[in-house]
């Protein structure tokens, strides 16, 4: 598979994941986090805002992999 196809597939997968994750994060943020103390809320929002990067890194690496030379 060439890089252009990997980037197209990866972009679609990434968009679907981020939209789904954003809905999940909003549901979690509106749940019990609103009842927690302010420092815990801050930490939770930071974690929720950054944790999506972890599962996306392998996808980004796969998308950036150079084409095989034939």
Image (cartoon, rainbow, N blue to C red):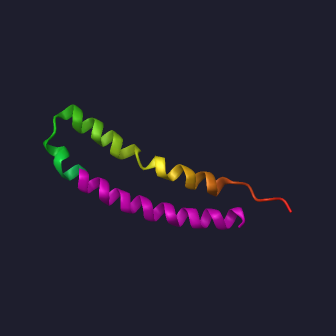
Q: Position of residue 17 (x, y in %)?
A: 43, 61
Q: Is residue 63 left or right of residue 70?
A: left
- The residue lying at 30 percent from left, 58 percent from top is 24
Tell me the chief SS of the magenta region: helix
Q: Is residue 26 above or below residue 6?
A: above
Q: Quadrant of residue 41?
A: top left
Q: Could you tell me which quadrant the N terminus lies in?
A: bottom right
- The residue lying at 69 percent from left, 54 percent from top is 65
Q: Is residue 4 magenta?
A: yes
Q: Could you tell me which quadrant the C terminus lies in?
A: bottom right
Q: Position of residue 5 (x, y in %)?
A: 66, 68
**Outermost top residue:** 39
Q: Is residue 69 left or right of residue 41?
A: right
Q: Is residue 44 above or below residue 57?
A: above
Q: How many marks?
A: 0
Q: Position of residue 56 (x, y in %)?
A: 50, 52
Q: Which residues are magenta?
A: 1-28
Q: Is residue 8 above or below residue 34?
A: below
Q: Is residue 1 left or right of residue 51?
A: right
**Outermost right residue:** 70
- The residue lying at 48 percent from left, 51 percent from top is 55
Q: Is residue 49 left or right of residue 69?
A: left
- The residue lying at 58 percent from left, 67 percent from top is 9
Q: Is residue 36 magenta?
A: no
Q: Position of residue 67 (x, y in %)?
A: 76, 59
């Amino acid at each position: 598979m060439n890089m252009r196809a990997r980037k197209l597939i990866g972009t679609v997968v990434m968009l679907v994941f981020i939209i789904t994750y954003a809905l999940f994060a909003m549901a979690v943020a509106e749940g019990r986090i609103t009842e927690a103390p302010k420092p815990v809320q801050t930490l939770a929002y930071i974690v929720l805002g950054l944790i999506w990067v972890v599962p996306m890194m392998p996808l980004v690496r796969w998308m950036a992999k150079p084409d095989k030379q034939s």
